[in-house]
């Protein structure tokens, strides 16, 4: 099968398709999304080697349970051991032995085929387009914030970063909290969320704080400093982006102002699919380009451009 | 009056006593404790100039409310504006206009006299010795953790750092949680908490995690790295020490494991006094030396020694 393989560099290669084990489904990938984590993996994050890609829509072509065969699905990316405390609590995304599709120990979705445990699969309702459904994974990551903390209708929120995840986080939080401000660098990107009633403001004219909740989704050290300056004493700061490598950070303000800092990663798929199916979140305007797998170099270049948002790879 | 004054260096000086304003009490200091924050101020933290010292026992010699005069008291160190949201919620320790005794904008307790708002005063029960009562402020800081998070009886706790605050934190948390481990460098210090049933272990043989709750009270970058390695996914890490200056810290594990990091500073005085009065916490074995104010240089040298714990200044 054709797949993008990262070894020392990324190449389009012809490799054997993955072999399905009992309990797993073999999936033909139709559409896959390029995420900032993919771009970080290509820069050396996690020392990843193999096939990247974890946002996808596909069709099950073989499975133990015949009810899955032929279904259009997406899938949760963490696969746990199934036996530890985390897996038994339904939180296999924290299983210490987990693999992560296209990120750690599991070949990813920039390929014609993948395998995933059947337990990870989620059917996509017929009326939801591939181009909408491919946002399930990042939307789930945005919804994770509502899993972690109590969002009051009156919570005053600021989201820093107008990338794909920042926009989704702002839209999700605005469904819970009436006062949401998005800070970013690109007016064209921020304009996408303005119709929802989200206040937007450029990074060089930051809003007047303090905010009860600040979400750092820019991945930049400047975003961290701004977040600290905007959150109120005893407020909450959500860290939604991984910084690759160590940065010099001053944690004293966290102590003095008794800030709660919460790391936030993957989230729940079923509500994400429901929100996409109901039209509560409409992500398609965030799509910048859809390119065939063979044009991956151009796709990655577009995805790296600060001006662009979501770039998709059409795989079959 | 005699006072220790920090300008470019610390000196014992003769300066005018502070002038009491309406609503304030004039207090003659009897006993004052040297805290790590004082040692940091002397190293330049907060650009402090003036009289340091914020842990004290004293006697009210003048006040608007005659019921205070002659009472033996200690006092909360944050003085708020009295009008903002924080002050109205009883949290003047987060008032943005606050002064902090001996730390920010308010002359401290390494002096014969101080002034403090009467609202900050707490009477000390007659049977509580000065040497016990002087621990009210640091014990309140340890109790602050129980104000911030729900401590379950079964919460598995690790405290990193065997300094004064680390020992108090371990003792306080052990009153809520049955399984508490203290990690430190000094067997003699850690031996003070072993009779309570707290497990102690040297820093070079760290315990086997993961822990639900880890408290970083060492103030060292190594303590931070150890804390991150010991806390479970979705666990809580309390930052109880201020790092002066920026340190290179890797925050990616916070995101991947969805850790909640909470800064923790000053705490509530009334429960601290009650705990000292009831003997629930008996801090006097932590006293390393009591020296007169004139011997402050020796007192500070002792306080700086990694081997020592609490050093007190007898002022009157």
Image (spheres, coloured by chain):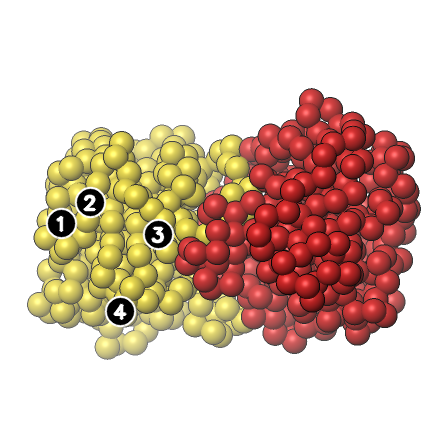
Chain colours: A yellow, B red
Using the numbered discs, state the Cα–Cα distance from disc 3 to disc 1 in whole angstroms.
Answer: 19 Å
Left or right: B149 in relation to A4:
right
Task: Identify the secondary structure beneath mark 4.
Answer: helix
**Which residue occupies 11% across, 60% down?**
A129
Residue holding disc 2: A200
- The quadrant the N terminus of chain B occupies is top right
Q: Which of pointers 3 and 2 lies earlier in the amino acid sequence?
A: 2
Please, which chain is the residue tagged with disc 2 on? A
Using the numbered discs, state the Cα–Cα distance from disc 4 to disc 2 in whole angstroms.
Answer: 26 Å
Q: Are marks 1 and 4 on the same chain?
A: yes
Residue holding disc 1: A194
Residue holding disc 3: A211
Q: Is residue B247 above or below residue B253?
A: above
Q: How many marks?
A: 4
Is residue B250 visible in the rendered structure shown here? yes
**Which residue occupies 66% across, 67% down?**
B270
Task: Identify the secondary structure beneath mark 3.
Answer: strand
Using the numbered discs, state the Cα–Cα distance from disc 4 to disc 3 in whole angstroms.
Answer: 27 Å
Q: Which of pointers 1 and 4 lies earlier in the amino acid sequence?
A: 1
Q: Which of pointers 3 and 1 lies earlier in the amino acid sequence?
A: 1
**Which residue occupies 51% across, 63% down?**
B90
Q: Which mark is residue A271?
A: 4
């Amino acid at each position: 099968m054709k797949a993008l393989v990262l070894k020392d560099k990324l190449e389009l290669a012809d490799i054997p398709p993955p072999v399905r084990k009992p309990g797993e489904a073999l999936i033909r990938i139709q559409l896959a999304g390029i995420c900032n984590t993919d771009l970080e993996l290509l820069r050396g994050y996690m020392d990843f080697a193999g096939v990247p890609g974890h946002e996808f829509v596909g069709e099950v072509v073989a499975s133990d349970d015949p009810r899955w065969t032929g279904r259009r699905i997406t899938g949760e990316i963490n696969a746990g051991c199934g036996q530890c405390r985390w897996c038994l609590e339904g939180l296999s995304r924290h299983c210490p032995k987990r693999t992560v599709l296209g990120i750690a120990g599991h070949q990813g979705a920039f390929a014609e085929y993948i395998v995933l445990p059947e337990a990870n699969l989620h059917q996509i309702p017929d009326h939801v387009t591939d181009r909408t459904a491919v946002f399930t994974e990042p939307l789930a990551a945005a919804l994770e914030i509502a899993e972690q903390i109590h969002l009051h209708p009156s919570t005053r929120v600021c989201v820093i970063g107008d990338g794909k995840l920042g926009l989704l986080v702002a839209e999700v939080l605005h469904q819970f909290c009436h006062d949401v401000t998005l800070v970013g660098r690109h007016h064209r990107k921020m304009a996408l969320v303005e119709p929802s009633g989200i206040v937007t403001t450029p990074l060089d004219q930051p809003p007047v704080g303090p905010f009860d909740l600040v979400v750092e989704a820019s991945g930049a050290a400047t975003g961290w400093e701004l977040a600290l300056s905007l959150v109120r004493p005893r407020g909450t700061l959500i860290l939604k982006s991984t910084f690759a490598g160590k940065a010099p950070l001053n944690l004293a303000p966290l102590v003095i102002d008794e800030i709660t800092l919460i790391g936030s990663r993957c989230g729940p798929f079923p509500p994400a699919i429901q929100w996409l199916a109901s039209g509560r979140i409409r992500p398609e305007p965030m799509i910048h380009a859809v390119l065939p797998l063979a044009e991956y170099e151009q796709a990655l270049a577009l995805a790296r451009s600060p001006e662009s948002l979501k770039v998709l790879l059409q795989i079959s």
